[in-house]
Image: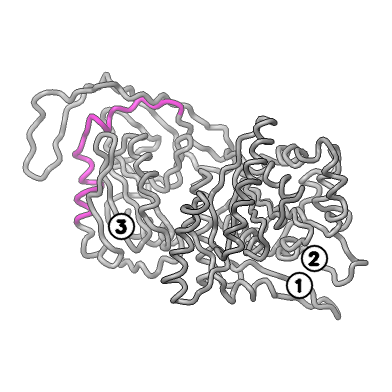
Amino acid sequence: MTFNPNNCRNESEVETKLIVSYLLPKLGYTPDTWHQEIAFGNIRLDFLSFATKVIPIVIDTDSPMSVVIEAKHPKEKLDRHIRRLKRYLTSLNIRYGLITNAKEIRIYERIASEIQLVFNCSGQELETRIDEIIALIGRDSLKIIKSPQNLELKYSQLNLVTPDLTNEIAIALNHPANVEPPPNPISQPENVPEIVPFAPEIVPEIKLDLVEPTTSQNTMKIIAVYHNKGGVGKTTTVVNLAAALSKQCKRVLVIDLDSQANTTFATGLVKFDDEEDDDLKQKNILHILQSEDFYSISEVARKSNFCTPAIDVIPSHIDLMQYETELNSLDYSRMILIQKLAEVQDKYDIVLIDTPPSLNFYARVALIAADYLIIPSDLKPFANQGLINVKDFIKKVNGFKKQIGKNPLQVLGVLPCKISTNAKFIQHSLPRRRDAIPKRYGMEIMESVIYERDDLAKCAEQTQIFGDMEIADPISVLDFKPDSVASQEFEVLAMEVLEKIGEK
């Protein structure tokens, strides 16, 4: 079988077309000697392969060394993931790690507590250099290698994720201090890795039953999307990021906390042409905030088919405007969203909150409830100046969160959004504007960039005819044109967000 890196358009295709269909068979790994989506506590590996059959997995003095293989989106830079790969290899005492985005293949070797690059090639070179990879991490190559560092395994507090949470296993991980290799190691022929005897009493046999992972064990993550400057792509970011996350098998809830209800429109919940037919008036975010005992998240949330898989949305309503002062005077109002979200923490993996472009009560409620914050910005002067207000607002919100015993807001970064696709602008102006964010405002700039593209406008303008009425029927850009550049940008954004919140 041949491999063409151009056939990999997303992370899933890197996994299936490169790793599963090409790389693992070439390296000699059979389906019973590699495992996908395996998790140890908060470490989640894309692929873990062994040189012998290991069902159940056995890690003892006779175990061959294993290889971690990580797949990334073709548009992602591998350098951003090296620190995480190092943690995998050093935490689990695994000697080799392969990381690839299909365009580039790298192999790192763990040496003590560091890792070093031992192989690198482009995706186009893979077939001509596959023998070098086989010599390094092929199944037969690893069968003959034993290493004291790799066999110092006493696992502690590592949980193997299971589909129904019934097979969770705790294992002890301690690294024996100052373990010296035995004297006079057995000599080997030139260019063959050294085989070192290792005292079997140092490492007890550990058996792990292989089970499939699930996201149901994860803690629900709440992300607010906020800027006090309007027109920076906030709603576009929320709805299409929600769609991208749902395609990563995440259970997503979107909350619209802006009285303009743009997210409610954008997710296709407004199915009426006349206010007399308004079916959102009686159940929306306002009712959740007004009542301590009634109107739960589950009761108010609506299924939106604007993307596949579908997401749940808490709609907003223009009535929010007239109740802001009243809600702000209530003692419990700022914390009620926290309380009601806690009731559905097992139902969703990620909650995205769209916020009003202001410093008002509703924006404050959103940031108080959130764990993380994304700040979309077109990087223009007024949006940049607005970051000063955003920083001050975050400081005040974190002061309140500290009083109620909630962790401070973690800012994932400023997201360049609605960025011009003009080539000269991208080449000359955009880098300067990106650099200005950390230098002038002390804020991290996200790697992802959302450009201003026609497909984003067209997918939001889709309609359906019902009788004699034309009703808005928007669709996510990932469903409208899955192979478009705009779709790929949101896929990359989803990957970056998942990594930063510890879900990847």
Q: Residues within 10 Å of mark 3 (few under 14, many from 20)?
A: many
Quarter in which the N terminus is drawn:
bottom left
Q: Disc 3 or 1, which lies upstream in sequence?
A: 3
Q: Amino acid at mark 3?
A: Ile
Check if mark 2's residue and mark 1's residue have beta carbons within 8 Å. Answer: yes
Rendering quarter of residue 247: bottom right
Q: Residues within 10 Å of mark 1 (few under 14, many from 20)?
A: many
Q: Would residue 467 appear left or right of 5 to someone viewing this image?
A: right
Residue 84 position, x and y percent, is 39, 44
Q: Which residues are magenta?
A: 132-157
Query: Is residue 141 shown in magenta?
Result: yes
Instruction: Judge whether 182 appears above or below 245 on screen.
Output: above
Instruction: Judge whether 201 appears above or below 481 on screen.
Output: above
Return the residue at label 3: 105
Q: Would residue 394 appear left or right of 413 to someone viewing this image?
A: right
* Secondary structure found at label 3: strand
**Residue found at x 61% / y 63%:** 382
Label disc, if present, on residue 191 of the rendered structure: none
Return the residue at label 1: 472
Residue 106 position, x and y percent, is 29, 54
Return the residue at label 2: 270
